[in-house]
Amino acid sequence: MLRAILPDMPYEITATRKRPQTFDDLAGQDFVSTTLRASIASGRIAHAYLFSGPRGCGKTSTARILARSLNCERGPTDKPCGVCDSCTSIARGSSLDVIEIDGASNTSVENVRQIKDEVLFPPNSSKYKIYIIDEVHMLSNSAFNALLKTIEEPPPYIVFMFATTELHKVPATIKSRCQQFNFRLFSLEVIRDLLRSAAADLGVEADDDALLWIAREATGSMRDAYTLFDQVASFSEGRITAAKIRDKLGLVGSERMGSLMGLCAAGDRKGALESMDAILASGVAVEQFASDAVSYIRSLLFLASGVEKEGLLGAPRSSFPEEIVAALDPPKLERMLAGLFDLYRDMRYSVNPRWELELAVSRLCAIRDYVSPTELSRTIRAMKAAIADGNAPGAAAFGAAMRGPDVASPVRKPEPVASAQAGAAPAAQASIAARTAEEGTDGPVLDLDALRASLLAAVGKNRVVLSTCLERSGPWSVEGEKLVIPCQNGYDAGAVLADAGLLAKKALEISGRSLRIEPRAAEAAPRQAPPRKRDEGDDPDDGDAGPADPVGIVEKVFRGRRVGEAKRLEDDSSSRGVPPAQAERSDEWT
């Protein structure tokens, strides 16, 4: 097709043919072109420029445009004529005063020393001698050091232009001596428009969705976009379509991917797995399938979030059926994307990448049952509120327990609740239920004696210290929502307070009323009688023979005696003339 249009000219790739020749042709880099044109117009020309940015974004092309602008016969001018000897020789790469050097193949200090010798000679026929060093970050440290003095104080007719894709590898001493310009990646819209212009120059028709796919695959690089465009145009037979790209390059395509995602959203595992098998059978690689699935669901996520910009979607809006967009909300799409990202990482170490893909597709079919943590938390809060307010079916008893006693509420008869402990006395619970019929200012009247007996039976021997402290406590009382337990001393009060949560739970199970346990210690604990002497046959676990104070409990558990008691026995033996060694020994403990 190209030879039919230009029969007398050899074939030229699109990246070379469409290379910008002036600042007006430099698309996508408005900041760079505007700044350079202003500096040329004002005569403020620097002696060193540093152009950095990703590959294929116009760094070398900008350097050549700047060289033509400086050495044009009408210049320096921001609009080089392009027809003078200087402009044409620079375009062909044959100018003696514009020297292009590949930094990747001229990395040694000897190459830089050659440049230092050459800068002593003025330009042959132009105003400036210009050195364009591409991939300057590849120079060695010695080469950079040898170049420092020349860059800092070059002759007035020397201009250095450096281009690099890895700015962080350029020494700071070089950066500080150059004017820096950062080039950006091209947007999808800019690449699509430039590709449409290139297709028009070749006389090739191109669909918008096909051009958008090429622009997306170029990832912001215009040179990559032109290279892929040439490849697609070579097999498109005068018309570039998405179907031809999909068939020739082994892609899934938006139609087949949309059909598969529709089956996943509907939960049809059988249909989704069969569709996936048909796509792979058509020659699509497993990795390409995963990549296309990620791209498609990413676009669905944008649509579900209200974003319909084609530059972000990477495809026309019509490529995404409305029923799929409506069926999947953002949390589900985020979950699907996370699963596919895990798939792509796991395939590298999998026994069989296809099996990993089949597992991922099967999991995608369960996405309609997925509940996000945020939604689950919101539902739980709503359920708790309904139960507390009594609006949920069967929630009256639970709501009463969560709210506590209410003096203004009508008479409530608590439902009998079975005790969680086998030791709780049924007769005591019946007594409690029988006497909870009246309402007072302090809530339902409870049979505190029966409640006390039930709690003691509930804690039993599992809480020996707690049971002992409750047995020694004074008469119980109810003050509002509090169950007051008068304790004999501070130790007993601390023991009851430590298990206040357990006692409140047992009290709720026994009486059906939510009470907060509040132990109160007496002002002064009574003096305890000395413990009786333990016989050899006493059972240390016998609850009836237990001591009457906490220290006695410890003596009983650890089979010891108080230090003070042992000293008293020793003093008594000494007074009676008994040797201390024959006195009764006691085990000291702390």
Image (spheres, rainbow, N blue to C red):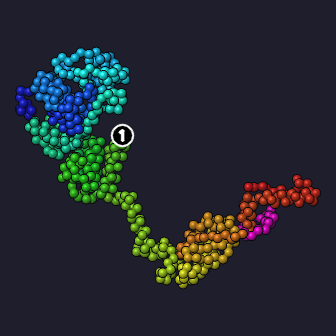
> In the rendering, at what x and y percent does residue 413 appear?
50, 81
Quadrant of residue 328 in the image? Answer: bottom left
Q: Which quarter of the rendering shows the C terminus? A: bottom right
Rendered residue at 30%/57% (across/down): 329
Which range of residues does the magenta coloring cover? 525-544
Would residue 324 be found to the left or right of residue 487 on screen?
left
Residue at 63% from the left image edge and 78% from the top image edge: 449
| Above or below: residue 424 compared with residue 237 | below
Q: Residue at x 19, y 41 (%)?
A: 190
Q: Magenta: predominant secondary structure element?
A: loop
Q: Report x, y in % for residue 15.
A: 18, 32
- Residue 434 visible in the displayed image: yes
Rendering quarter of residue 554 = bottom right
At label 1, counting other C-alpha atoms closer than 10 Å, the crowd grade (few under 14, some 14-19, many 20 or more) is few
Quick check: is 448 in the magenta stretch?
A: no
Residue at mark 1: 348
